[in-house]
Amino acid sequence: MKSVSPRIDPDQLTADSAAGFSREEQAEAGLEAFFAIANEWGLGNEEARTLLGSPSRSRFYELRRGAAGAIRSVSEDTLDRLAYLTGIYAALNILYTPGSHTEWLRNDSQVPAEAMYRPWGLSSPLAYLLTGKLKALADVYDYLNSERGGV
C-alpha cells in the first residue's frame, strides 16, 4: 500500500468515485483513506476496529498493513462501511473547517430539543458510530448529507 498523506482531499470522495475501479482497487483505496481518517480523528485501534465492523485483531492489522490477501477478501459489509466513513469525512469537510469537524464528532448535544432530530440523541455522533452498527454509519452520513443540502 502506498504511503498516505495525513490530509485527504474531500473533493475526491464522491459517490461516483468507485465507478470503473475493481473491487480490490476500491478496497485498497477505501482502507488507505479510512486509516488516514482514523488517524486525523484521533481514533485508537479498538475504535478503528469497531468502525470496520470488529474484524479480528489479526485481520485488522492485515488490513492496516495493506496485505494483498486481506484486501482481496474484504467483505461487502466492510466496503459499505468504508463508503459511509469516507462520505462522512467528505461531508464534515464541506460543513466545517479543518479541525472543527473532529470536535463536532466528539461533542455531546447540549440542546435537548435538537436531540430529537438526531439519530444519536444527546450523545456524540462518534459515540453513536462506535456502537459498531452499519445503521449508525448510514444515519450519520444521511444526517450530514441533509445538513449540507444533499438528497
Image (cartoon, helix red, strand yellow):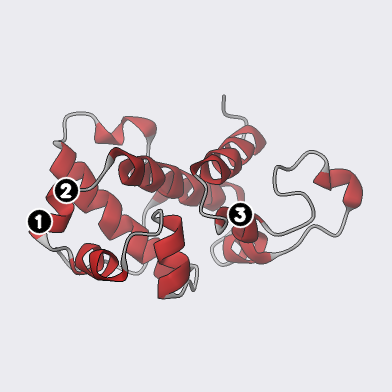
Name the residue that disc number 1 marks.
69
Lower sequence index among marks 3 and 2: 2
**Who is closer to the viewer here, 68 or 150?**
68
Lower sequence index among marks 3 and 1: 1
Q: Could you tell me residue 104's position as x and y percent? A: 66, 60
Q: Residues within 10 Å of mark 3 (few under 14, many from 20)?
A: few
Kind of element beneath mark 3: loop
Which residue is drawn at the image coordinates 20% and 52% (left, top)?
28
The mark lying in front, picked from 3 and 1, is 1
The mark lying in front, picked from 3 and 2, is 2
Residue 73's label in the rendered image is 2
Q: Amino acid at mark 3?
A: Tyr
Task: Answer above or below: position of 20 versus 63.
Answer: above
Which residue is drawn at the image coordinates 22% and 43% (left, top)?
26
Which residue is drawn at the image coordinates 33% and 59% (left, top)?
55
Q: CA–CA distance between discs 1 and 2?
A: 6 Å
Q: Could you tell me residue 147's position as x and y percent? A: 66, 37
Which residue is drawn at the image coordinates 49% and 43% (left, top)?
134
Q: Residues within 10 Å of mark 2 (few under 14, many from 20)?
A: few
Label 1 with label 2: CB-CB less than 8 Å: yes
Residue 96's label in the rendered image is 3
